Image (cartoon, rainbow, N blue to C red):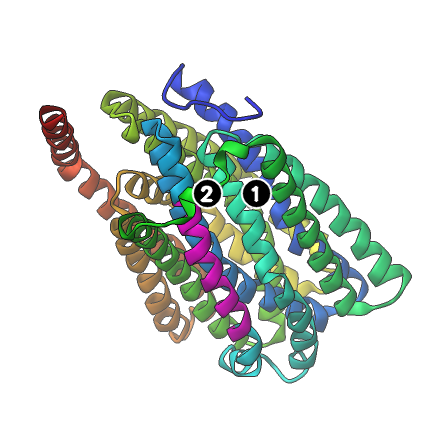
C-alpha cells in the first residue's frame, strides 16, 4: 500500500476510502499552513494583520491553483498510463510534464513579483492593510516554486495509488510551520514577516522531503535518458490535460479573488470576518474536494483499464459518501459557527464575529453542492473530458461573481448577497453536470470501446 495501490481491483468503497482518507488528512494539514499564520497573527498581532494575511491567502490560493491545476492535469495522464500498465509511457509523460509545467511555474513566480503592487491595487486593499500585506507577500512569493515541487510529487505518487507518503511529508512540514510560527512571531517578535518565513521554510522542507522519497523508493517513475526525448503527441496530451485543468482551477480561484475585491470594499470588519470564515470554510469542505481528486484517480485508472461497470458503481458510491459527509459537516458548522470564529478572532470583536457567523450559516449549509461539483470535476477530467470541468467551473463561478455584485448592491441585502451567491452557483453547475453525465455516458464508452476493438483488429 505504501508504494501504491491498484484502484482497478477490490471492493470499491473500502478501496476508495483507503486511498482518499490520507488525501483528506493531507489537505486539511495543508490548510494548516495559512491557518497557523491566521490564528497566531489574528490573536497576537491585530485585526489589520489578520486582514492582510487573509487577503494574501486568497491571492496565494489563486496563484497556487495554477500550479495545482497543472499537477492535477498531469496526474490524470499518469493515472491513465498506470491503468493501462504502460510504465514507459508514464515516464515519458513525467518528463513532458516537468518540462512544460516547470517552465510555466518559473514564469509565474517572476510575474508575481513584477506585478505585486498592481495586484494589491486591483484587490482594493485598504491603506492601513497595504504595507503589511505587501511585506507578507514579498516573502511568501518565494515559495511558489517550492509549492509546485511538492504538488507535482504528490500528484505523481497519488496517480500510482500512493496517497500516504504525501500525507506524512506534509504532516512533518505542518508541524514545522506551527513551531516556526510560534518561535518567529512570539519569541523573536518578527510580526507578520515571521509568519511568512515560517511558511516558506516549511514549504521547502515538504518539497525536499517528497523529492527525496521518490528518488529513493520509486526509481521506476523517474524518466530515463531515452524518456527525455519527448514526442509531440506526449507533450500535446500533457499540455491538453494540464492547461484545461489549470484553467479550471484558475477560473475557480479568480472568481474567488474577484469576490475578495468586493468584500474588501465593505471595509476592514467584513474583510477580517471573511478572512477568518474562509479558513473555517476551506477546512470544512476540503475533505470532499480531496474525495473528488481521489475519485478522479480511481476513474482514470479504471478508464485506462477499460472497466466501465466499475466506474459506474464507483460514481454511485462516491456520490453517497460525499452527500453523507457534507450534510454532517454542514450541521456541525451551522451549530458551531460562533465558537469557530472565536478561534481566530478575539471575543471582543463582536462585529467581525457576527459577520463571520452569518457567512458560515448561509454558505456552510450547502456544502453538499460543492461536494457533488468536485466529483463532477474529477469524473470529467478522468474520462478525457477536462473541458467539461472548465465549463462547469465557469458556470459556477461566473454566476457567483455576477450575483455577488448584483445582490450586494440591493438595499436590505448588502453583504449577505455575496454569501448567498455561492450556493446558488454550486446548484446550477451541479444540475448541468449531472444532466450532461446522463446524456453522454453511453456515447463516451461506446466510442472508447470501438477504438479499442479497432486497435485489436489492426494488431
Please indicate whether residue 268 sits to the left or right of residue 187 in the image: left
Label 2 sits on residue: 289
Q: Quadrant of the C terminus?
A: top left
Asked which quadrant contains residue 307, the reply is top left
Asked if marks 1 and 2 touch (Cβ < 8 Å), the reply is yes
Residue 143, relative to residue 211: is it above or below?
Answer: below
The residue nearer to you, when weighing 357 against 457, is: 457
Residue visible at 75% across and 68% down in the picture: 192
- In magenta, the rendered stretch is 93-111
Label 1 sits on residue: 27
Assign a secondary structure to mark 2.
helix
* Relative image position of residue 306 (x, y in whole percent): 24, 25
* Relative image position of residue 177 (x, y in whole percent): 74, 51
**Total labels drawn:** 2
- Disc 2 crowd, CA 10 A, few/some/many (<14, 14-19, 20+): many
Asked which quadrant contains residue 163, the reply is top right
Query: Would residue 428 be visible to someone looking at this image?
Result: no
Residue visible at 26% across and 55% down in the picture: 391
- Disc 1 crowd, CA 10 A, few/some/many (<14, 14-19, 20+): many
* Relative image position of residue 322 (x, y in whole percent): 42, 33
Amino acid at each position: 500500500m505504501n508504494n501504491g495501490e491498484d484502484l482497478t481491483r477490490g471492493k470499491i468503497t473500502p478501496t476508495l476510502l483507503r486511498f482518499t482518507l490520507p488525501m483528506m488528512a493531507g489537505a486539511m494539514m495543508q490548510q494548516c499552513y495559512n491557518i497557523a499564520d491566521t490564528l497566531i497573527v489574528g490573536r497576537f498581532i491585530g485585526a489589520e494583520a489578520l486582514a492582510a494575511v487573509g487577503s494574501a491567502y486568497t491571492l496565494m490560493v489563486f496563484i497556487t491553483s495554477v500550479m495545482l491545476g497543472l499537477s492535477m492535469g498531469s496526474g490524470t495522464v499518469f493515472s491513465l498510463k498506470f491503468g493501462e500498465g504502460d510504465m514507459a509511457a508514464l515516464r515519458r509523460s513525467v518528463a513532458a510534464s516537468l518540462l512544460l509545467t516547470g517552465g510555466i511555474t518559473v514564469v509565474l513566480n517572476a510575474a508575481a513579483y513584477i506585478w505585486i503592487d498592481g495586484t494589491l491595487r486591483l484587490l482594493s486593499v485598504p491603506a492601513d492593510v497595504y504595507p503589511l500585506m505587501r511585506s507578507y507577500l514579498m516573502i511568501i512569493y518565494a515559495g511558489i516554486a517550492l509549492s509546485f515541487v511538492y504538488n507535482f510529487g504528490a500528484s505523481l505518487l497519488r496517480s500510482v495509488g500512493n496517497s500516504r507518503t504525501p500525507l506524512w511529508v506534509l504532516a512533518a512540514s505542518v508541524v514545522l510551520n506551527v513551531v516556526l510560527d510560534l518561535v518567529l512571531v512570539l519569541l523573536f517578535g518578527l510580526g507578520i514577516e515571521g509568519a511568512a518565513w515560517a511558511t516558506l521554510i516549511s514549504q521547502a522542507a515538504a518539497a525536499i522531503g517528497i523529492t527525496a522519497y521518490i528518488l529513493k523508493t520509486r526509481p521506476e517513475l523517474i524518466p530515463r535518458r531515452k524518456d527525455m526525448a519527448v514526442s509531440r503527441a506526449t507533450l500535446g496530451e500533457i499540455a491538453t490535460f494540464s492547461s484545461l485543468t489549470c484553467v479550471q482551477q484558475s477560473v475557480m480561484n479568480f472568481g474567488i479573488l474577484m469576490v475578495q475585491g468586493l468584500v474588501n470594499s465593505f471595509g476592514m470588519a467584513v474583510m477580517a470576518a471573511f478572512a477568518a470564515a474562509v479558513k473555517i470554510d476551506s477546512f470544512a469542505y476540503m475533505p470532499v474536494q480531496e474525495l473528488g481528486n481521489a475519485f478522479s484517480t480511481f476513474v482514470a485508472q479504471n478508464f485506462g483499464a477499460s472497466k466501465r461497470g466499475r466506474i459506474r458503481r464507483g460514481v454511485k458510491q462516491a456520490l453517497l459518501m460525499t452527500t453523507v459527509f457534507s450534510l454532517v459537516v454542514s450541521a456541525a458548522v451551522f451549530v458551531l459557527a460562533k465558537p469557530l470564529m472565536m478561534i481566530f478572532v478575539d471575543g471582543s470583536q463582536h462585529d467581525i464575529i457576527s459577520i463571520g457567523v452569518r457567512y458560515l450559516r448561509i454558505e456552510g449549509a450547502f456544502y453538499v453542492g460543492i461536494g457533488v461539483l468536485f466529483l463532477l470535476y474529477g469524473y470529467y477530467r478522468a474520462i478525457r473530458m477536462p473541458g467539461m470541468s472548465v465549463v462547469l467551473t465557469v458556470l459556477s463561478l461566473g454566476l457567483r461573481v455576477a450575483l455577488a455584485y448584483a445582490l450586494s448592491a440591493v438595499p436590505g441585502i448588502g453583504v449577505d448577497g455575496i454569501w448567498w451567491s455561492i450556493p446558488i452557483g454550486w446548484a446550477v453547475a451541479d444540475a448541468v453536470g449531472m444532466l450532461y453525465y446522463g446524456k453522454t455516458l453511453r456515447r463516451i464508452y461506446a466510442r472508447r470501446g470501438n477504438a479499442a476493438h479497432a486497435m485489436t483488429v489492426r494488431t
